Amino acid sequence: MSAADPRPTPAPRDAQRLGTQVGALALANPVLTASGTFGSGDEYADFLDLDRLGGLVTKSVTLHPTQGNPPPRVAETPAGMLNAIGLHNDGVEALCRERLPALQACAARVVVSVAGSTIEEYAAVVDRLAAEPRVDALEVNVSCPNVKQGGMTFGVSASSCADLVAALRERTDKPLWVKLSPNVTDVTEIARAAARAGADALVVANTLLGMAVDVERRRALLPNVTGGLSGPAIRPVALRLVWQVTHAVDLPVVGVGGIASVEDVVAFLLCGAAAVQVGTMNFVRPSIAVELIDGLDRWLQEHGETVRVLQGALEAPPA
């Protein structure tokens, strides 16, 4: 950093203070970027130092290129946004050929989000990624609300989720993180099913199904009518889900949903998350992830805490 650089010098980071563990995967710090909000990672290299991240999660990748839903696919709402992208991506071959090489020297953990319409499609994507050394873990997206088949089908049924996770568990030794849907009656039922089938960690949670209406034109803002609601508006729901899941299963949980400040990160850790993912705020402030890492480090120093000590340290309610 040059003498003319106006950016503040980050506080010294301490691996003991910031380090965390998601199953067998050690992270330098608990801040990752969420799937669908950070491209394949290298697109953000001009905005922040990717090496500083605990990890980055790619956009969901399918076996074949997918065009997604027709535009417009994003709509603003109070304290959040709706998206109906529909898993638009160039397919797993393009990811391996064009995107993963750009991350070869990146110090951050690389997690690839995997999607499909059938177990066979998920399995084919996992097979292709199994031998990729740059892929540290696979995030199984069973919770996208914006596709007509597959996706959330596996996330709203305990038996379907278990069948999918078990099939993928047989095909790879890489850590499997299962991203759960909040659009269910009982998230702990799906969490237990994924755990029994061999998941290594759970990501809690994906977007909430919602819609917005143009009252003058008397039509939905999105051609898809509904979309996934994200941003600060869903944070209280996400915190509740993380707290429930961490008390229901003995697996590490990665919390995601509306994180916008250091206090938000701490709240997820206190509720039991081992790490967090930052999503919608990447669109608002592309450097937000490293700002949160530096801010969390200062917060921990000031409070004499570590990430591991904070994890699950929320006070129990009075008897």
Image: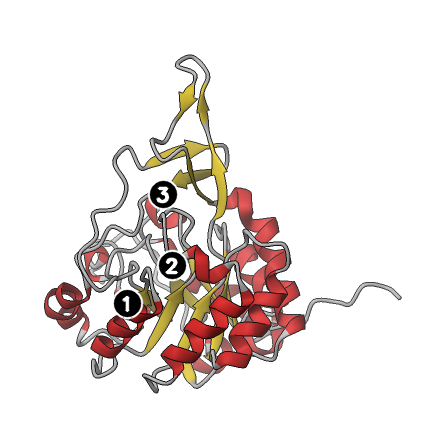
- What residue is rendered at 35% in x and 57% in y? 8
Q: In the image, residue 139 lies at what x, y percent?
A: 38, 69
On screen, 63 above or below 136?
above
Pick the residue in front: 301 or 165: 165
Few, some or many residues within 10 Å of mark 1 (<14, 14–19, 20+): some
Q: Quadrant of the N terminus?
A: bottom left
Circle 1 residue: 121
The answer to whether residue 28 is seen in the rendering is no
Give the residue type at disc 2: Ala
Relative horizontal placement of residue 204, taking residue 6 as reference (left or right): right
Circle 3 residue: 284
Pick the residue in front: 67 or 283: 67
- What residue is rendered at 38% in x and 27% in y? 221
Circle 2 residue: 34
First reached walking from the N terminus: tag 1 or tag 2: 2
Q: Secondary structure at mark 2?
A: loop
Give the residue type at disc 1: Glu
Few, some or many residues within 10 Å of mark 2 (<14, 14–19, 20+): many
